[in-house]
Structures are given as C-alpha cells and as structure tokens.
Image (tube, rainbow, N blue to C red):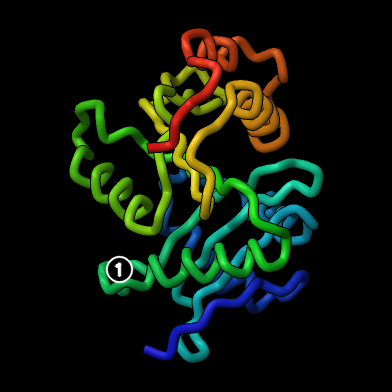
Amino acid sequence: MALHVKALEHHNAHEFDGFYAIYSTAFPLSEQKSRDALLAMQRASFYTIYLAYNDEKIVGFCMMYHPHEDDFFLLEYMAVDESLRGIGLGSTLLKSSIYQLFETHGTKALLIEIDSPEKSSSEQEIREKREQFYRRLGALKIDPFDYILPLQSAEKPPPMELLVYHPSLREVPKETLQTWLEKLYVDVYGCAKTDSRIAQMLESVPPILNLI
C-alpha cells in the first residue's frame, strides 16, 4: 500500500469531499458536526485536517486543533476507511500527522479524549483496544484524574480519560491542567470558563499529576 499523509488544502473541495465521505460514516450522528461547521473548521487557521492517501484515494483523516497562543493541541477526530481497518493504517496516519503537526506548530502536549475502559460497558473491548492503540504510540494517562466531557445536553456523559502525547513530558502541574480544561471547554465546546464541571474535575487532584 503506497500510503502517504498530507494536510488538506484550504478551499480544496475535492479533498474536503473525500474527508467528509469517511467522516459522515465513521461517527454516530449525535457526535457529528454539520458539514458547514466542518467547512469552517477546514478554513480556520487553528485547525488542520491531515489526509491519508492510498495512491490517489483518501482512506483516512486526522483532525488536529492547534490554538496559536496555547501550550497544547487536541486530537479532535480521527478515522480510517471502514474496509481498511486493522492493517496498521491508523497508526501510520496518526504518527505522520503528529510529526507534521509538531514540525509546523512546535512540540506541545497533544491531548486525546477517550472513553474510559476502566468502567464496565457494553463496548468494553472497543474501549480497551482504543486506549491500547494510543498507548502503543506513546500516549500516557493523566493520573489521578477523571475527565468530564462537556456535553451541551442533559445526557449524562460517558466516563472519560484524557491522554497526553509528548516526547518528554511525564507530569503536569494542576494549574496547567486547569488552563487546558478551561480552553477546551470555552474554545472547543462553547462552554463557560466558570463551568462547574471544571472545578468538579480539579477538586481532589494533587498539585502535580503524573503521566503514566
């Protein structure tokens, strides 16, 4: 497989259509953003969508949020063509995306939101495999810490974890974690900086949190 990864070009309708064809089938409708919202993200200077090409066909994507003034990035979405899963394409895509992200925007903590495999679920095996996938690439878990996904509905969010990928980072000060959470809640999810869930998450964490 002649796989290569490149950033989606701004205003490239063909590449966007290839990305959207995978995006629209990879996630539940309740988790999807509208096509217009994704187009706006594509054109924003603080988002990059990396595309995996097999020869001339788009077979996967990785969407990164990289705010200019902050000291972290966020892996917002990632998916590969359903017919090509399980052959290592995802790890190649993510590693290449991270390399290009760091080359272009500097080396910062990359945050990754995942459903916690530590809580029993009907999707237990899927959650465990997803965590193992990121851990094999070097991502570490913030400990002790339980992440609350900032849903904008009355629906109770699933138990979550926040993983961190960074070549050398092995601990995070509580103040840094608070800044990350406030930025995520406000800039990515449209919540208030004073959202009570932020204080709830930080209530019992120590001054320094380990990455394990």
In the image, residue 194 sits, relative to residue 147, either above or below, namely above
- CA neighbours of label 1 inside 10 A, class few (<14), some (14 to 19), many (20+): few
Q: Position of residue 155 (x, y in %)?
A: 44, 20
Residue 30 appears anywhere in the view = no
The residue lying toward the viewer, choosing from 106 and 11, is: 106
Q: Position of residue 170 (x, y in %)?
A: 48, 40
In the image, residue 126 sits, relative to residue 178, either above or below, namely below
Corner quadrant of residue 7: bottom right
Residue type, mark 1 in image: Arg
Corner quadrant of residue 79: bottom left
Corner quadrant of residue 121: top left
What is the tally of numbered marks visible in this picture? 1
Residue displayed at 69% across by 31% down: 183
Could you tell me which quadrant the N terminus lies in? bottom left
In the image, residue 150 sits, relative to residue 132, either above or below, namely above
Which residue is denoted by mark 1 in the rendering?
A: 85
**Does 99 sit left or right of 120 as displayed?**
right
**Does 147 sit left or right of 198 as displayed?**
left
Secondary structure type for disc 1 = loop
Could you tell me which quadrant the C terminus lies in? top left
The residue lying toward the viewer, choosing from 205 and 152, is: 205
Residue 50 appears anywhere in the view = yes
Residue displayed at 52% across by 50% down: 168
In the image, residue 101 sits, relative to residue 196, either above or below, namely below
The residue lying toward the viewer, choosing from 132 and 49, is: 132
Residue displayed at 59% across by 26% down: 173
